[in-house]
Image (cartoon, helix red, strand yellow):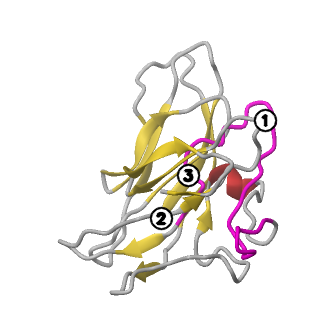
Amino acid sequence: ELDFDGYRLNQGWVAPVIGMEVDGKTVIKPEALTSSWQHKSGTYTATETKVVKVAVTNATANGYGNDFLLDNLGMKPVEVTPVDKQGLDWDFNDGTLQGWIAAGLYEKYNQLNTTYWKGADGSNVLGSMTDFVEGRDYSGEVVYRYIEVEAGKTYELDFDGYRLNQGWVAPVIGMEVDGKTVIKPEALTSSWQHK
């Protein structure tokens, strides 16, 4: 997994469009940075043992105002979970993230918890209550993990969701696999919903 945090310095000029490549192959799709810190990540699978060139890219040609900051550039191996015939189910009953990894601001500000809230049956659930701080953008990934799938097989993904605060904006939650939407993001309500 490769990742970085990016920030756009000048709002009045062109936006820097930043991504990452390994040996010329896009690993993190170039996207325009905003005026709040954003966490970007992508995966690269090595097919052989060798030295690779890792590069940060900017797709914006303009020199004026094409200014940005980068922090926490990283590359680390990931653990892959195989899916067996019974499938996989994460219920968070043990009070841990069970191998899921907090993403973006949820990780940075430690805003995921599995022991604070309880489900309808009293069991532990994964939850988040974010802070209102001007400029923080919580859109994007919340949690992620790497799962090994088999060619030619179809997989069903699902989750149960619940909205905590009715007086604020509704969380719009969905699921993606390798950046492709599998469960369309929809606003959660104050009753448990199966997606």
- Magenta segment's dominant SS is loop
Q: Where is residue 17 in the image (x, y as percent from the top left)?
A: 46, 32
Which is more N-terminal, label 3 or label 1? 3
Q: Position of residue 73 (x, y in %)?
A: 58, 55
Give the residue pinned by disc 1: 167
User: Given the image, on which type of amino acid does mark 2 rest?
Assistant: Glu
Residues under labels 1 and 2: Cα distance? 37 Å
- How many other residues sit within 10 Å of disc 1, few (<14), some (14-19) or many (≥20)? few
Q: Is residue 127 inside the magenta stretch? A: yes
Give the residue pinned by disc 3: 141
Q: Position of residue 56 (x, y in %)?
A: 46, 46
In the displayed structure, 51 sits above or below 18; it is below
Q: Quadrant of residue 96?
A: bottom right
Apparent side of residue 9 relative to residue 63 in the rendered image (left or right): right
Residue at disc 3, secondary structure:
loop
Q: Nearer the viewer, residue 118 or 55?
A: 118
Give the residue pinned by disc 2: 1
Which is more N-terminal, label 2 or label 1? 2
User: Given the image, on which type of amino acid does mark 1 rest?
Assistant: Gly
Apparent side of residue 94 relative to residue 192 in the rendered image (left or right): right
Residues under labels 2 and 3: Cα distance? 15 Å
In the displayed structure, 71 sits above or below 48; it is above
Q: Nearer the viewer, residue 165 or 69?
A: 165
Residue sitting at 58 percent across and 70 percent down?
100
Residue at disc 2, secondary structure:
loop
Which of pointers 1 and 3 indicates the residue nearer the eye?
1
Q: In which quarter of the image is residue 176?
A: bottom left
Res. 8 in view: yes
Q: Give the range drawn in magenta.
A: 117-144
Q: Is residue 56 inside the magenta stretch? A: no
